Image (tube, rainbow, N blue to C red):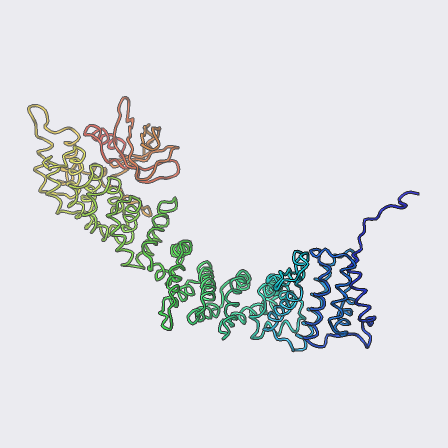
């Protein structure tokens, strides 16, 4: 036979002290009656419960490992405790032990702890159901019972016993039961368990009543979570009613109640958020703000501030900007009764960076502008402009520019004034953003600041401002822009001057004719570059400036000996200008070169100042960029003003490049160009400088390639 061991040692320990405890109780209290019989022992009142707990704490002291008592000494100690109490108390404890008997293998300390909890819960649940114990008294009752057990569960430490003499105040040591009940966290768990084990009817009455604040947050959270997760509408409605009832306790006269509710609302925040997935009820924010205005306790005030901050954040996330504004306005109202120094600070903290960015993004969304958003954003114009500056630097920045302009125009002066001051800053990114935003939202302000700011700008900032002001969308300001351009030409960078002169000619600004004639003649103090002179001559032709005809004849015909006094490119430009002014028979081909046809539905980043021709056979070109290095490209279209370069290498808009176009056998056109736009497969560039010879080559190439 296998599987049977004879005379094997069994590792099973029987606690002799626990056995002695039960035997002594039986000896002193007699046989306990059967459960359910007429003689069943009940706990008649609170004093009996306290006496029973004291007896339990005393007779279990010998069970403590720290005392290290022998079975005989432990039994004597139990007998002494029995002798010091009443017979009824012994019978009550014996009845409890018979009802909650030890489990197999249960350690004495764990059993005593479980027995104590059972005694307490049995009594308190019965008292609560009978109405003798109110919700507010539950926690204090547990605290009082804890004090009883802690006091009764102390014994002299081993060192005092070993000394053999009593000192006037011997040092005392707590039993494990007393130490457990002394911990506030343990009692808190018991209170939570009490509320969770409460029958549904009694629990519902408390949750709907004024004493809801006394329910521990853990118990309340679990109850609300169960209702919220039920899936049906009725339980969720009940959970909402409970939360609102709980929040109304912020008006309670007892400061303890207000503090508990303020802290509890923060701990219940995730459930509150889930119970109202769309918009929180206005009562929550109004109640919290009203409570904050009258609250004097610092801890409660701090908890209320945290809750209000959470409410405001959720309002922004969910697009309830009116609710968010209402919170801010309430916090900004003066608190006259007493000092609330932290409230104005809270109002500012509500506009935290991430929250403010959400409001900005909402203002830039492709929908009707909520009237609340501009009012919110004008509270911190600098932060708004910083956010817009960052967005403009992103890849999607250009597409957001119209929405940014709409927002800025709606807010008006507070933002526009700061934008204008940013034109004079030293930080290029902020200057660049200010130029773009003003050019789109209020070009007049940019024009007013141009004269002062232009001399301090690098050429790329000047180029950006001029190109932005030259957009077709700014056509109503073209005349004013041309007038301003003519007044600041002397301070402009050589790479920017050609575009400014083109805009003067296109806008018909006749007041600039004397200055253009001076430049064309080469008599200007600074603007003597051949390319700039050619641009001035072309502008005189666009303006049909009859007063310049004598000068143009002189430039095209004057000789120095047998050779012409002026280079061929400049003379050709003067002849074209004369043909346009005099309306000669040859002027048709000239106008075809200069007058870019308007294509219906097409809006260019910079208006076409010359007719662009499509090349049947694209020309090869080499592009040298500072950032991207050298690369090859194909010229698909070209004009006197620019070209489109087909290339796999993308260039940055606003970047200056050196371009070499191979226009025929052994012929090359060299120029400096600015990247004006980027498209799939290539970039559009504007020619901003080339020498006279290259300009003449380009003119001949364009005339040759033009249809008809």
Residue 657 in the image, given as x and y percentages of width and height: 29, 33
Q: Quadrant of the C terminus?
A: top left
| Front residue of this view, candidates 26 and 421 | 26
Residue 178 in the image, given as x and y percentages of width and height: 65, 62
Residue at (52% x, 72% y) in the render: 249
| Front residue of this view, candidates 290 and 568 | 290
Residue with the most extreme left position: 561
| Front residue of this view, candidates 380 and 31 | 31
Residue with the most extreme front position: 165
Residue 582 in the image, given as x and y percentages of width and height: 12, 40
Q: Is residue 161 above or below residue 664?
A: below
Q: Quadrant of the N terminus?
A: top right
Residue with the most extreme top position: 666
Q: Is residue 53 left or right of residue 224?
A: right
Q: Is residue 385 left or right of residue 150?
A: left
| Front residue of this view, candidates 221 and 495 | 221
User: Visible in this render: residue 31?
Assistant: yes
Q: Is residue 279 left or right of residue 61?
A: left
Q: Is residue 466 above or below residue 48?
A: above
Residue 465 in the image, given as x and y percentages of width and height: 25, 45
Q: How many numbered marks appear?
A: 0
């Amino acid at each position: 036979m296998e599987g049977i061991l004879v005379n094997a040692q069994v590792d099973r320990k029987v606690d002799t002290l626990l056995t002695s405890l039960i035997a002594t109780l039986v000896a002193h209290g007699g046989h306990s009656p059967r459960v359910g019989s007429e003689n069943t022992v009940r706990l008649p009142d609170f004093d009996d419960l306290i006496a029973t707990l004291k007896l339990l704490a005393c007779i279990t002291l010998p069970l403590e490992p720290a005392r290290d008592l022998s079975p005989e000494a432990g039994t004597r100690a139990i007998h002494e405790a029995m002798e010091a109490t009443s017979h009824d108390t012994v019978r009550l404890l014996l009845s409890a032990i018979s009802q909650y008997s030890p489990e197999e293998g249960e350690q004495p300390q764990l059993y005593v702890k479980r027995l104590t909890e059972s005694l307490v819960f049995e009594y308190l649940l019965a008292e609560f159901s009978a109405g003798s114990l109110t919700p507010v008294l539950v926690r204090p009752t547990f605290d009082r019972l804890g004090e009883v057990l802690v006091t009764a569960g102390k014994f002299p430490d081993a060192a005092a016993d070993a000394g053999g003499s009593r000192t006037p105040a011997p040092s005392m040591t707590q039993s494990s039961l007393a130490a457990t009940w002394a911990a506030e966290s343990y009692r808190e768990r018991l209170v939570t368990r009490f509320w969770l084990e409460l029958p549904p009817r009694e629990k519902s009455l408390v949750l709907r009543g004024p004493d809801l604040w006394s329910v521990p947050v853990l118990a309340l959270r679990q109850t609300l979570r169960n209702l919220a997760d039920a899936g049906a509408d009725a339980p969720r409605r009940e959970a909402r009613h409970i939360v609102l009832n709980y929040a109304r306790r912020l008006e309670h006269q007892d400061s303890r109640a207000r503090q508990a509710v303020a802290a509890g609302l923060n701990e219940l925040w995730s459930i509150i958020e889930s119970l109202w997935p769309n918009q929180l009820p206005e009562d929550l924010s109004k109640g919290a703000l009203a409570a904050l205005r009258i609250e004097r306790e610092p801890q409660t005030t701090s908890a209320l501030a945290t809750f209000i901050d959470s409410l405001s954040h959720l309002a922004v996330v969910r697009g309830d900007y009116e609710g968010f504004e209402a919170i801010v306005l309430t916090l900004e109202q003066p608190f006259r009764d007493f000092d609330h120094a932290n409230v104005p600070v809270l109002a500012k903290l509500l506009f935290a960076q991430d929250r403010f960015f959400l409001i900005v993004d909402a203002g830039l969304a492709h929908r009707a502008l909520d009237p609340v958003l501009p009012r919110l954003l004008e509270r911190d114009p600098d932060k708004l402009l910083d956010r817009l500056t960052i967005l403009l630097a992103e890849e999607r920045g250009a597409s957001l520019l119209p929405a940014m302009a709409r927002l800025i125009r709606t807010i008006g002066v507070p933002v526009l004034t700061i934008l204008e001051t940013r034109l004079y800053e030293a930080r290029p990114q902020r200057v660049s953003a200010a130029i773009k935003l003003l050019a789109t939202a209020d070009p007049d302000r940019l024009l007013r600041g141009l004269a002062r700011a232009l001399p301090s700008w690098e050429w790329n900032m000047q180029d950006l401002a001029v190109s932005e002001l030259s957009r077709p969308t700014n056509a109503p300001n073209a005349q004013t822009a041309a007038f301003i351009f003519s007044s600041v030409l002397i301070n402009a960078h050589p790479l920017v001057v050609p575009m400014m002169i083109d805009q003067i000619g296109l806008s018909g600004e006749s007041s600039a004719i004397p200055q253009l004639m001076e430049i064309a003649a080469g008599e200007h103090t600074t603007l003597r570059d051949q390319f700039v002179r050619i641009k001035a001559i072309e502008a005189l032709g666009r303006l049909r400036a009859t007063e310049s005809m004598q000068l143009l004849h002189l430039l095209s015909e004057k000789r120095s000996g047998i050779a012409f006094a002026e280079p061929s490119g400049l003379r050709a430009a003067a002849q074209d200008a004369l043909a346009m002014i005099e309306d000669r028979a040859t002027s048709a081909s000239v106008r075809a070169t200069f007058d870019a046809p308007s294509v219906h539905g097409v809006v260019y980043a910079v208006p076409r100042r010359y007719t662009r021709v499509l090349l049947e056979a694209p020309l090869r070109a080499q592009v040298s960029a500072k950032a991207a290095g050298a690369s090859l490209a194909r010229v698909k279209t070209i004009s006197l003003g620019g070209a489109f370069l087909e290339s796999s290498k993308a260039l940055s808009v606003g970047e200056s490049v050196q371009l070499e176009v191979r226009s025929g056998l052994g012929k090359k056109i060299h120029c400096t160009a600015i990247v004006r736009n980027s498209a799939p497969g290539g970039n559009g560039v504007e020619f901003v400088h080339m020498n006279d010879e290259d300009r003449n080559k380009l003119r001949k190439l364009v005339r040759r390639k033009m249809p008809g």
